[in-house]
Amino acid sequence: MPNTLWYLPLEQLDERYTGALYDHTIDDLEESDIDNYEVVHGETLTSEVETGQVLDAESRNYYAMSQVQELLKEVKAGNLTDGDVVFNQDFWHIGMSSLQYLSDIRDWDIGLYGFVCAGSFEKYDFVNLQGMTPWAKHLEEMWGEVYDGLFVGNERMRDMLEPRVQNPSKIHVTGLPLSQEWIYERVEPKPFEQKEDIVVFPHRWDMEKCPGRFNELADRFADEDVRFVHTTGRTGSIGNGPEPSDNVGVIRNPDGKKQYYEILSRSKVIFSAALQDTIGNAMFEAINLGNVPVVPEGQYDEYLPQRYRYTRGDLSAAESMIRNALDNECIAPISSTRRFNHSTERMLQIMAQEYQL
């Protein structure tokens, strides 16, 4: 009988990409040759980000710990056993040491795999910016040892992660766990049919994403018929960045990704000034919905041509690029993102081959 894959998703919040990652992974699991898989959900404390940035700080830890509790119950019940695989949507999971401890105590070989979303090895990641690196780097080195496989979105992430991993061969460049087809199936109106003069800021409204630059650009277009828009699923504060300019429209998304994708289907430009955005889920979504990216040098170098990048801090250059895009003088580089399609399938294939799933 084949071994079982135990999938540990991130908690699904409307304002974040976690729900999309979950839905996409489940779709690929159902279409895969893996017959035995179980989804291990945890318990949440809130449905939005109230403390912290990427996910709610207390709820994220509570969710992860409750997932491990569920896995330990499955071990006691004889369901999770030697040769099974645990797949984490995010390798930054506090419970992985518990599973390695259990595996060693029982002399089992439980396969541990995770997708690397971010970490202290990124200079401008909030973990680093908030002074956590002195202890976080040791956690990441421990995870680099206990995980049997680590999946990353691109070569740049692999290069940053390697110093934390003694055996770099366990790092697999698989691409982002999203695909063009999956996005298109969830969009109405269809991309490219009703484009308007809308510029979208796709990131969290937090300091390392530099939303103040978006404010400055919006003010430059204040007397023109161009909308600068930021969307959020939060009901309170939208982040730790500066207050949005009067010329920035903040749209609160009651329908989460559905409404956000509808906006991206109508907008023409996506603007970034982020200090750090190594993987770029937001960029992937927006480009595939027909948006021209205007991004700083040093970001998305592995798949965006030079003509979509401006010198960091040169807002006049960024403004000129936005005007060209609004005048339909350049098009979204959709073909550049195709290398990321079927990435979840590649992750599943690697785990299935190594552990006979």
Image: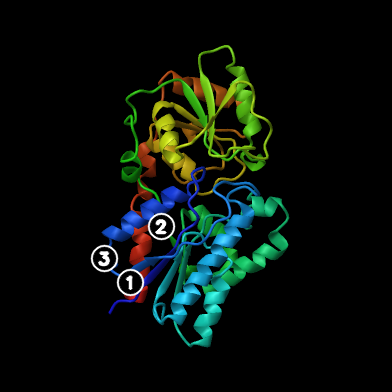
Q: Percent position (x, y) of residue 45?
A: 58, 55
Side of 304 where 96 appears, left or right: right
Measured Cα–Cα span from mark 3 to mark 1 = 11 Å
Task: Give the residue at x 51% y 45%.
Answer: 16
The image quadrant where one finds the N terminus is bottom left
Q: Earlier in the sequence, mark 2 or mark 3?
A: 3
Side of 345 where 241 appears, left or right: right
Q: Percent position (x, y) of residue 221?
A: 57, 17
Q: Percent position (x, y) of residue 322?
A: 51, 24
Marks 2 and 3 in Cβ contact (< 8 Å): no
The image quadrant where one finds the C terminus is bottom left
Residue that numbered label 2 is attached to: 174
Measured Cα–Cα span from mark 1 to mark 2 = 15 Å
Q: Earlier in the sequence, mark 1 or mark 2?
A: 2
Secondary structure under the numbered disc 3 in the rendered image: loop
Q: Quadrant of residue 188?
A: top left
Residue that numbered label 3 is attached to: 33
Q: Earlier in the sequence, mark 3 or mark 1?
A: 3
How did the renderer colour the structure?
rainbow
Q: Is residue 58 above or below residue 53?
A: below
Measured Cα–Cα span from mark 2 to mark 3 = 18 Å
Q: Amino acid at mark 1?
A: Gln
Residue that numbered label 1 is attached to: 353
Side of 262 where 280 appears, left or right: right
Circle 3 packing at 10 Å, graded few (<14), some (14-19), many (20+), is few
Residue 166 visible from this viewpoint: no
Q: Quadrant of residue 87?
A: bottom left
Secondary structure under the numbered disc 1 in the rendered image: helix
Q: Amino acid at mark 2?
A: Thr
Q: Is residue 339 above or below residue 60?
A: above
